[in-house]
Image: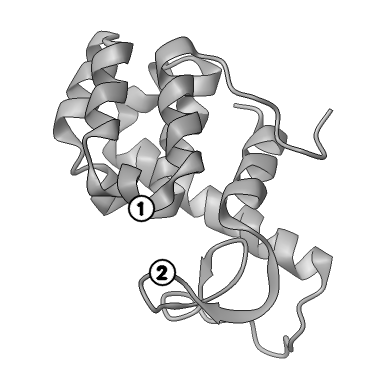
Amino acid sequence: MNLTLLYAELRRDEGVRATPYKDTKGKLTVGVGHNLTASPLPAGWAYPLTPAQITQLLVADVADTLAQLDARAKWWRTLSEVRQRVVANMAFNLGVDKFLCFAKAIAAMKEGGWDTAADQMQDSLWFKQVGARAVRLCAAMRTSTMPIAAGVS
């Protein structure tokens, strides 16, 4: 999978913040969707975070998400590059546990039922909550194409 594209998509979808803020669930967050309650900053780091620190957190958080998907949903690596990024993006946003609750969408993905998978993604609270991101990810699931995020060539 092209991690550079995934990082750019997550930066677009999550936003980038050098100082802590409360996310939509009230969790203290920084960087690119980094949950400070689940994973505090390394010792000695201070705000505002540098671009390098934000990237370091993002790379570690993505690696953790992908490792969890590899351990718990081995099938996801059989998908096309774009559909793998859809799954990774959703799992990063929701957490792997909550992503795995999309049982009907996942069953459709495993069978190559892209329209059904996208329909199931759309028929969720997640879709209503995340707006344009969800619209993009559902379209990418249907077509296996995704618009390039800004700043990526």
Q: Which residue is mark 2?
A: 24
Which amino acid type corresponds to the residue marked 2 in the rendered image?
Thr
* Picture coordinates of residue 35, whole percent (x, y): 48, 72
Q: Is residue 62 above or below residue 103?
A: below
Q: Which residue is mark 1?
A: 129
Residue 93, disc: none
Label 1 element class? helix
Which residue does the image show at 77% across and 83% down from the upper left?
48
Which amino acid type corresponds to the residue marked 1 in the rendered image?
Gln
* Picture coordinates of residue 3, whole percent (x, y): 66, 36
Q: Is residue 37 above or below residue 75?
A: below
Left or right position of 138 against 59? left
Q: What is the number of callouts on the image?
A: 2
Image quarter where the C terminus lies is top right
Tell me whether the residue at label 2 lies in contact with that at label 1, contact meaning CB atoms closer than 8 angstroms: yes
* Picture coordinates of residue 14, whole percent (x, y): 57, 55
Which label's residue is closer to the chain start, 2 or 1?
2
Q: Depth check: give the residue in front, 19 or 72.
A: 19
